[in-house]
Amino acid sequence: MGQPRWTVVVPVKRLGAAKSRLRGALPAVPHEELALALAADTVRAARACPAVAEVLVVTDDDRAAALLAAAGARVVPDAPDAGLNAALRHGAAAAAADAWVAALTADLPALRPAELAAALTAAATPPAVRRFVADAPGTGTVLLTAPPGVALAPRFGVDSARAHAASGALPLTGPWPSLRRDVDTAADLAAARRLGLGPGTAALTTACP
């Protein structure tokens, strides 16, 4: 039996409200442009991952919706409009009933498709339970997965790695540096740049060497 094909749910906030701690990280670049580039590079990498059948973006931002749909994502509105976890539950509900579902944060501009594929392959090994990948510091979560018939039950937010573990999700421990490198601060962006940024974010950083 072959490996499962995944629906990857990516939540994207309204650009004006997204990534507030990154505001001013690239002084020559409007903040909304940076937030959009981070999301676009994340979606492009997920779309290029051989384990992924569909990228499903949940957003109420018209500009993000248009760009990410053009990049090949299926876009659904954030109907709950009640925060990140509600958006992820809504996206998971929009996936096919037999889908393997993964929640992926929208701030992974250095993401390599092969690393995402390795993490998803590890997530599909028995037993069939929820699993998660912590961020580089080990406190947050960048990826949460669920097999068919199991609720995604996201618990993103402060100390989400601990919250996901407490909820019964099992940690995935592969190195996967580009997957673990989410970008919340200017220091995170510099670390992602050292790994190698996707094209959208890389183009913006040339304005601020």
Image: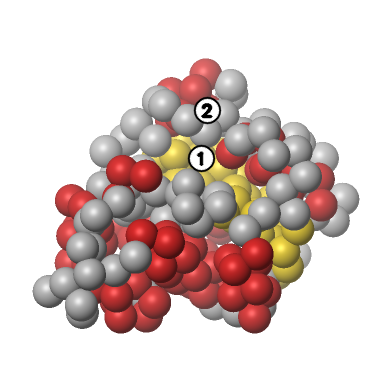
When the figure is inspected, residue 134 is found, relative to residue 6, above or below; the finding is above
Residue 64 position by quadrant: bottom right
Please report contact status of discs 2 and 1: CB closer than 8 Å, yes or no.
yes
On the image, the x and y values in percent for residue 154 come to 61, 34
* Residue 161, quarter of the rendered image: top left
Amino acid type at image mark 2: His
Kindly state the secondary structure of the residue where label 2 is placed. Answer: helix
209 or 110, which lies in front? 209
- The residue drawn where x is 59% and y is 68% is 63
Q: Position of residue 142 (x, y in %)?
A: 45, 46
Please give the name of the residue rendered at 18% of the width and 67% of the height, measured from the top-left corner: 194
Q: Secondary structure at mark 1?
A: strand
Of 49 and 63, the residue lying toward us:
63
Q: Residues within 10 Å of mark 1 (few under 14, many from 20)?
A: many
Name the residue located 72 percent from the left edge and 64 percent from the top edge.
75
Q: Which residue is mark 1?
A: 132
**Quadrant where the image shows the C terminus:** bottom left
The structure's colour scheme is: secondary structure
Point 30% across, 51% down: residue: 23
Disc 1 residue type (three-letter): Phe
Earlier sequence position, callout 2 versus callout 1: 1
Tell me the tag on residue 164.
2
- Which residue reaches farthest right? 97
| Residue 171, above or below 19 | above
Is the residue marked by circle 2 packed among few (<14), some (14-19), or many (20+) residues within 10 Å?
A: many
Which residue ends up furthest to the left in the rendered image? 209
Left or right: residue 91 compared with residue 168: right
